Every structure is written in structure tokens, then in C-alpha cells.
Image: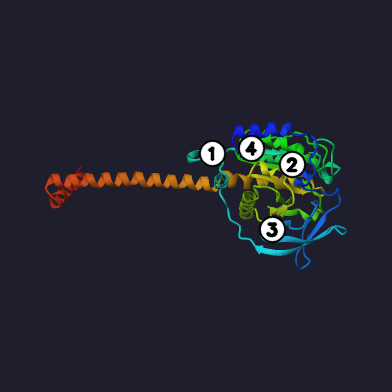
């Protein structure tokens, strides 16, 4: 999306009425009251995930094991959602420039692709907090989730990545917050970041997100992708690419991918993702450790393996060219010498004579 299109879209959005149009709130999903959560069950009644997200038919869940499930029954009274196995997904890494090209967006070419760019961060639900560390699940103002966002920003900056971190408040904590945060997303997009992350925490039991990695307890990170979104195909490829890299780099760090009913403002950018960094029952330091590791996943996807491989290939090609030129020059010099002295026999005798004089000296 170019700057002119972003400005036009922003103007149109500002001119819209401030109250929600009937039915549009459904575009931004629904959350349960803190302390309430759905249990997602697999075909064998095994627990797949516990979450504060409202469950709907046709929602999908890609687990840590890359099995894809679809919700086929919702028991609202008991907060249960039953699923069927759709497929075993073989994750593939789609280069982010290819995803941009797929939507007709500007693609960074040449050596510029190896340079680290900028990542944008914000919080739709600013009040979200972590009970063990913050004393409450929600704080009226910048909650504990802001410190997790700051840890994410710091980790990205330490890797040499530019960060545009918005701490704009979109209170209160309700579905309307997505409508209010939409203007923040548009403002961030005007800075042309490579990607945008909306950082949240889930509402679930502590065990739903706790994991021990690198001898430390931390929280897993869950990706949320909105199904009511024209960018769904690209968002799906993008989320699965990040999970594939995360699985290789830090197995278990990525909790999974939830494809839920809603929009989550992901229609504004194909490389936009909602992150659930632990739950309200986890400690904030654990969430900060988890999101800091995820920063390395982001770095590798946008600025790591492909760029480094490209540079390495170019370097090897350059060295081959240099050695090729040197070898050709050497062969040419020998050929000229042989011709000038009257053939290989004469050239060999001259070399032997020079070696003999060198020994005597």
C-alpha cells in the first residue's frame, strides 16, 4: 500500500460515523470475561487449547504439531468447542517479498533486501495485564502488556531492527477497541514498516502457555489470524512461515495458529498478525522472555537466512571470479613465455638453469 492510498483510506475512515455500523463489530471477534475460557477438544476428546477467545463453527486451529483442526460443534453453556482433524499441514516458508508481490505491493529488490528494515508494534487491548506480576488481570491504562511490548521492541532493536512502537490507548477493553485501534494501524502503516504486530495476552489457565526453553520458564506465543479478511490467503502463508521458522529455531515456542471469526484489522496489511503472549495467569517476566525469543524468529524471517544466503552466494561467486581471472592470467603468461623461448623443451632448460644458479647463490 503506497502513502497516497493510506492517506485516502485514513480520510475516508475519519469521515465515517464514530458509532459502529450494525454488524461491523462482528468483524473484530469476541472475547470472554476474564476468568472464563473455552476448551478446544480434538476428535479423541483431547485438550488442544484453552483460550479466552469466543469459539465459532468453522474456526480453525493449527496446533504445535501442525495438525489442523476445524470447529464442528460449540457448547456455549460448558464453554467447549469440538473439532475434526482437517489435515496434517506441511509448513512452508514463503519469502515475505513474494507475499507482497502476490498482492501487487512494492517489492524491495537487489541489495536493499539484505538491510534490516522496520517493524511496527501496538496494543489494541492496552489494559491487559498479568496477575502474578501486576496484581490484576486488567489495569485501567497502560497495563502489563505494554512492558511485554517494550521487551519485544528492545529485543528487535538489539538485533539491529528499526521499531515503531505505538503505546496509544484504545480503552476500554472491549470489541470496539479494534475499531479505535484501526486509526493507530493506519498511522503505523504510513511509516511503511515491513510488518505490524498487535501484542496481546490471552485469558486461560497458566498451563495453557507455560513452557520451559533454554532452562528457563517462559510463555509460548500464539498467532491469531482473522477469517473475515480479504488478505486471509496471504496472512495464512505469512503466519505459517513464521511458525515454520520458530519451530526450527525454538521448538515449542509457537503455541499454534488460531484462524478465528473476525478481522483484527488484518485487512489493512497482509503482513499483520495478532500475538497472544501467554495468559493473565502467567507472570509478566515469563511473557517478556517468550516474546524476546520470538524477536529472533522475526529477524530470521525478514532479514536472516535468505539475505545471508544471498550475500554468501555473491561472495563465493566473486571469489570464483577473482581466482578465475588469476588462473587465466597465469596460464596466459606461461604460454607467452614458452613461445618466446622456442618451445617447452627450451623453457624447461631455462627453468632448470635458473634453479641451479639460485642454489649456488
Residue, disc 2: 148
Q: Earlier in the sequence, mark 3 or mark 2?
A: 3
- Residue 64, disc: 3
Left of 108 or right of it: where is 325? left
Vertical placement of residue 281 versus 65, above or below: above
Circle 3 sits in a helix, a strand or a loop, which is it? loop
**Of the image marks 1 and 3, the number of the one nearer the N terminus:** 3
Q: Position of residue 273 (x, y in %)?
A: 68, 46
Q: CA distance from mark 4 to mark 3?
A: 28 Å
- Please report contact status of discs 4 and 1: CB closer than 8 Å, yes or no: no
* Above/below status of 150 relative to 238: above
Q: How is the image coloured?
A: rainbow
* Residue 192 visible to the viewer: yes
Tell me which residue sits at (78%, 55%) in the image: 56
- SS at circle 4: helix
Disc 2 to disc 4, how far (Cα)? 14 Å
* Above or below for 309 versus 46: above
Amino acid at each position: 500500500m503506497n502513502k497516497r492510498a493510506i492517506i485516502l483510506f485514513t480520510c475516508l475512515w475519519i469521515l465515517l460515523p464514530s458509532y459502529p455500523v450494525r454488524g461491523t463489530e462482528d468483524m473484530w471477534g469476541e472475547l470472554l470475561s476474564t476468568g472464563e475460557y473455552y476448551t478446544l477438544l480434538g476428535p479423541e476428546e483431547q485438550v488442544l487449547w484453552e483460550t479466552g477467545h469466543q469459539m465459532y463453527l468453522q474456526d480453525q486451529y493449527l496446533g504445535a504439531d501442525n495438525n489442523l483442526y476445524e470447529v464442528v460443534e460449540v457448547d456455549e453453556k460448558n464453554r467447549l468447542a469440538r473439532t475434526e482433524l482437517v489435515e496434517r499441514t506441511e509448513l512452508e516458508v514463503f519469502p515475505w517479498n513474494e507475499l507482497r508481490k502476490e498482492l501487487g505491493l512494492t517489492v524491495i529488490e537487489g541489495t536493499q533486501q539484505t538491510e534490516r528494515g522496520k517493524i511496527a508494534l501496538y496494543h489494541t487491548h492496552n489494559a491487559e495485564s498479568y496477575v502474578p506480576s501486576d496484581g490484576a488481570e486488567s489495569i485501567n491504562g497502560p497495563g502489563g502488556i505494554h512492558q511485554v511490548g517494550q521487551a519485544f521492541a528492545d529485543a528487535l532493536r538489539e538485533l539491529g531492527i528499526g521499531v515503531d512502537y505505538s503505546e496509544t490507548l484504545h480503552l476500554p477493553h472491549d470489541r470496539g477497541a479494534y475499531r479505535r485501534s484501526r486509526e493507530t494501524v493506519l498511522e503505523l502503516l504510513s511509516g511503511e514498516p515491513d510488518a505490524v504486530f498487535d501484542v496481546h495476552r490471552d485469558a486461560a489457565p497458566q498451563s495453557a502457555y507455560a513452557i520451559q526453553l533454554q532452562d528457563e520458564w517462559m510463555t509460548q506465543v500464539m498467532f491469531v489470524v482473522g477469517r473475515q479478511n480479504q488478505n486471509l490467503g496471504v496472512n495464512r502463508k505469512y503466519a505459517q512461515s513464521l511458525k515454520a521458522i520458530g519451530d526450527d529455531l525454538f521448538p515449542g515456542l509457537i503455541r499454534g495458529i488460531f484462524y478465528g471469526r473476525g478481522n483484527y484489522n488484518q485487512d489493512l496489511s497482509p503482513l499483520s498478525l495478532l500475538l497472544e503472549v501467554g495468559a493473565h495467569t502467567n507472570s509478566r517476566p515469563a511473557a517478556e522472555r517468550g516474546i524476546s525469543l520470538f524477536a529472533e524468529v522475526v529477524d530470521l524471517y525478514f532479514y536472516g537466512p535468505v539475505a545471508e544466503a544471498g550475500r554468501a552466494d555473491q561472495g563465493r561467486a566473486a571469489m570464483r571470479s577473482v581466482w578465475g581471472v588469476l588462473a587465466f592470467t597465469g596460464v596466459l603468461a606461461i604460454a607467452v613465455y614458452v613461445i618466446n623461448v622456442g618451445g617447452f623443451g627450451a623453457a624447461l632448460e631455462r627453468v632448470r638453469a635458473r634453479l641451479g644458479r639460485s642454489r649456488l647463490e
